[in-house]
Amino acid sequence: MFEPGFYVTAELRLKDASRVAAARQALAGLVRRTLAEPGCSIFTVHHDTAVPTRFLLWERFEDEAAFKRHFEEAHTLAYLEMELTEVVRHFVTDVLG
């Protein structure tokens, strides 16, 4: 079902609880643009239904180099400049098999 690769799961926290709608909109745009990047096959955001200031990212890149290039993309830099969220923790994994 899933191919080996560079998988990242990240927990994000909203910096300002009053900006949930802005964060949802900005993250939706980030998803669309990131999925068009070479080397990215999964990039999805989940919004915690119990804790509205928490988002989870599930990502898969072909390799670590593609993941690192993601942070050089204009759309990623623009999202980060908005300072809507911060990374609480992240995990780098790969599939068994």
Image (cartoon, rainbow, N blue to C red):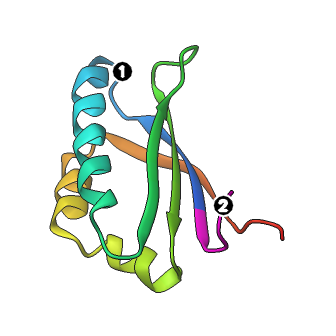
Secondary structure character of the magenta stretch overall: loop
Magenta segment range?
1-7
Amino acid marked by disc 2: Phe
Circle 2 residue:
2
Q: Residue 2, image x and y in percent?
A: 66, 61
Q: Which of marks 1 and 2 is nearer the N terminus?
A: 2
Q: In this view, does 69 lie to the left or right of 74?
A: right
- Residue 87 in magenta? no
Circle 1 residue:
17
Quarter of the image that includes the C terminus: bottom right
Q: Which residue is at a point 36% across and 21% down the rendered structure image? A: 17
Q: Residue 45, image x and y in percent?
A: 44, 40
Q: Which residue is at a point 26% across and 49% down the rendered structure image? A: 32
Q: In this view, does 30 lie to the left or right of 85?
A: left
Distance of mark 1 from mark 2, alpha carbons?
Answer: 35 Å
Front position among marks 1 and 2: 2
Q: Which residue is at a point 61% across and 74% down the rendered structure image? A: 5
